[in-house]
Amino acid sequence: MDEIVVQEKKRVLYLTLNRTAKRNALTAAMCNEIVQRVRNIQERADIGSVLIASHGPVFCSGMDLEEVRDEHGLDLERVHEDLFTMGRNSLKPIVVAVGGAALGGGLGLVAQGHIVMASEFASFALPEIKVGFWPFLVFRAVEHAIGSRRTLELSLTGCKFHPHDAANWGLVHRVCPATEIFERSETVARELAKASPTAIHAGLQYARDARGKTLEEAGEIAAKLRVQIMAGDDFKEGIAAFQQKREPHWPSLPENFYREKVS
C-alpha cells in the first residue's frame, strides 16, 4: 500500500498521507517523495497547485521515531531540511487540509502550506521536549508562520493548541466543519489552479526572493516583477475581461484547459 497516495486532477497535484496504522508518521522515504513530487511540478504547466491531505483520524504524528533513532544510514537532516523549506521555495501554491492532530514534524508540514485549512477537531503541538529532544528543523518553519516568541513557548512546553488558536496566530487560515474539510480545501486548490499562472508564479517568487531583504531591495524585486507582469499577456487579458465583465481566459494556462472545462 502506498504511504503517499498521488493523484493529478484538474491541474491539482494531490498528495495524501496514507500510513494510518502508524498515525501517518513520516519516514524519510515519505518526506523524500513529498519533496520530489513538489519539485517535479515546478515547471509543469499542467499542474497549478498542490493539495496535501491525509487518510485516517490523525493528520500526521510527526517523524517516525524508530527511524530517527536508528537512522538506517539515511541522511535524515537533509531530507527533513528539504521538507521544512519546501513551502518557502515552491512557486506553485500549496494547500494543506488538516483533518486531525498535527504534531512535531506534522506541524512543520502544515507550516509549508501557503493556505492551510483545518478541521474544527484538528489539534497541534510541538511535543519533542517530552522525549528529550528539540524541534530544530521544524522550529524555523513554525516560527515563520506564528512568530518566534510563540514558537519558543510551544517548543518549551510541548502543549497542545487548537484550530481557533492556530487561526488567531496565523498558522491556519480557515477552520471548517470536519465533514467539509477536504471538499473546501479541494475547492481552494482548484481555484488556485485556474488562476493566472503568471501572476501566481511572480507573486510566490516575490515572497521568496524578498524575504529577509531591506525595504529598498524588496522594492527593486517588486518593481522588476511588476514590469514583467504588466507587459505580459495574462495581465492584458485580465484587464480586457474586467472591462468586458467576463471571466478571463489566461493565455499562460495550457491550451487544452478551457476545452476540457467545456467538454
Image (cartoon, rainbow, N blue to C red):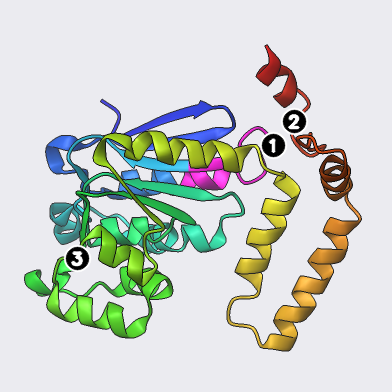
Q: Is residue 197 left or right of residue 94?
A: right
Tell which tag, 3 or 2, sits nearer the viewer: 3
- Mark 2 secondary-structure assignment: loop
Q: Is residue 93 left or right of residue 249?
A: left
Quadrant of the image occupied by residue 146: bottom left
x then y, percent, for residue 15? 40, 37
Q: Is residue 48 visible?
A: no
Distance CA(mark 3)–CA(mark 2): 42 Å
x then y, percent, for residue 61? 19, 52
The part of the chain drawn in magenta is 36-50
Q: Is residue 60 above or below residue 241?
A: below
Q: Is residue 125 visible?
A: yes
Q: Which residue is mark 2?
A: 254
Q: Is residue 205 above or below residue 59?
A: below
Q: Which residue is mark 1?
A: 45
Q: Is residue 148 left or right of residue 155?
A: right
x then y, percent, for residue 101? 19, 52
- Mark 3 secondary-structure assignment: loop
Q: Which residue is mark 3?
A: 161
Q: On the rendered image, what quadrant is the N terminus found in?
A: top left
| Nearest the eye: 262 or 63 | 262
The residue type indicated by label 1 comes to Ala
Quadrant of the image occupied by residue 68: bottom left
The residue type indicated by label 2 comes to Pro
Q: On the rendered image, what quadrant is the C terminus found in?
A: top right
Do callouts 1 and 2 mark residues in contact (Cβ within 8 Å)?
yes
Q: Residue at x 56, y 55 (%)?
A: 90
Distance CA(mark 3)–CA(mark 1): 38 Å
